[in-house]
């Protein structure tokens, strides 16, 4: 899965899955534009990549703000000259039962998890069309496939990402650009760290492989979908969930 000469933009790269994806793609030879809100963590990640003979640059951005997305991607394009690979990973939760969910919490999750992905795709597509090669990878969730009580906003945003993935895949396939999604199950990140031990133990009981996933499990899948080896796969949702959801 050689990615030498490719440039990847990873959103939500300051921690968790995004952080792991950036490191994995860098190890395979890609230059990495890391994007997230926390500038200090981004710069530390970029320094880590360059210390290991890779190429990386940090682009602070709040993906809930359209102007910031446009500015950050414009800067990344100016810095690297192109973007070959986009990993839409940035995401948030604002959990609450639907009868108590505030409209602001619905809007925040949809804007960050779904609308931002559309905006990022829109900004990088011209670069991919120009070179007639591209990889778009949207990080969705098992709960976008099966739902989850208390997460009407999150599940809707992640289900929307799946529809977006398929629509974009059909639009750009003729230009040698693929668009796929990865649907992680329970992954050990800061987002799941707040869950109680009892909840985690019950979650593991639902997973045939008998463990929570790691960010590296997702990053390995992303590296494959970003590579030439995945060139005949598009519009697909790759489940990385330990068997939690099958079929």
Image (cartoon, helix red, strand yellow):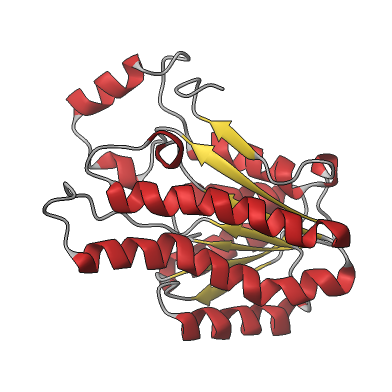
Q: Quadrant of the C terminus?
A: top right
4 w.r.t. 143: above or below? below
Q: What residue sits 49% from the left and 28% below the top?
A: 241
Query: Can you tell which quarter of the image residue 5 is in?
Result: bottom right
Q: What residue sits 24% from the left and 38% below the top?
A: 149
- Note whether residue 22 is visible: no
156 w.r.t. 72: above or below? above
- Note whether residue 21 is visible: yes
Taking the view exactly as shown, the residue that stands out farthest to the left is: 100
In this view, the residue in front, 130 or 2, is: 130
Q: What residue sits 71% from the left and 80% below the top?
A: 77
Query: Can you tell which quarter of the image residue 126 is in?
Result: bottom right
35 displayed left or right of 204: right
79 displayed left or right of 61: right
96 w.r.t. 79: above or below? above
Q: Quadrant of the N terminus?
A: top right
130 displayed left or right of 19: right
- Residue 61 percent location from the top left of the image: 47, 76
- Residue 130 percent location from the top left of the image: 86, 75
In this view, the residue in front, 239 or 68, is: 239
- Residue 146 percent location from the top left of the image: 40, 33
61 displayed left or right of 110: right
């Amino acid at each position: 899965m050689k990615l030498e000469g490719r440039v990847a933009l990873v959103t939500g790269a300051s921690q968790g899955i995004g952080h792991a994806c950036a490191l994995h793609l860098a190890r395979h030879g890609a230059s990495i534009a890391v994007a997230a809100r926390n500038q200090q963590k981004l710069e530390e990640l970029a320094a880590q990549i360059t210390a290991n003979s890779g190429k990386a640059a940090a682009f602070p951005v709040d993906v809930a703000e359209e102007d910031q997305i446009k500015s950050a991607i414009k800067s990344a394009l100016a810095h690297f000259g192109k973007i070959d690979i986009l990993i839409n990973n940035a995401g948030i939760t604002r959990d609450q039962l639907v009868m108590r969910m505030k409209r602001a919490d619905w809007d925040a999750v949809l804007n960050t998890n779904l609308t931002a992905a559309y905006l990022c795709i829109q900004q990088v597509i011209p670069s991919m069309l120009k070179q007639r090669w591209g990889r778009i990878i949207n990080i969705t969730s098992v709960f976008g496939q099966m739902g989850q009580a208390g997460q009407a906003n999150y599940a809707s945003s992640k289900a929307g990402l799946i529809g977006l993935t398929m629509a974009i895949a059909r639009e750009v396939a003729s230009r040698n650009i693929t668009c796929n999604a990865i649907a992680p199950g329970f992954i050990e990140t800061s987002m799941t760290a707040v869950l109680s031990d009892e909840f985690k133990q019950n979650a593991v009981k639902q997973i045939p492989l008998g463990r929570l996933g790691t960010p590296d499990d997702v990053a390995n899948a992303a590296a494959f979908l970003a590579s030439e080896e995945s060139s005949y796969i598009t519009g697909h949702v790759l489940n990385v969930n330990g068997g939690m959801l099958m079929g």
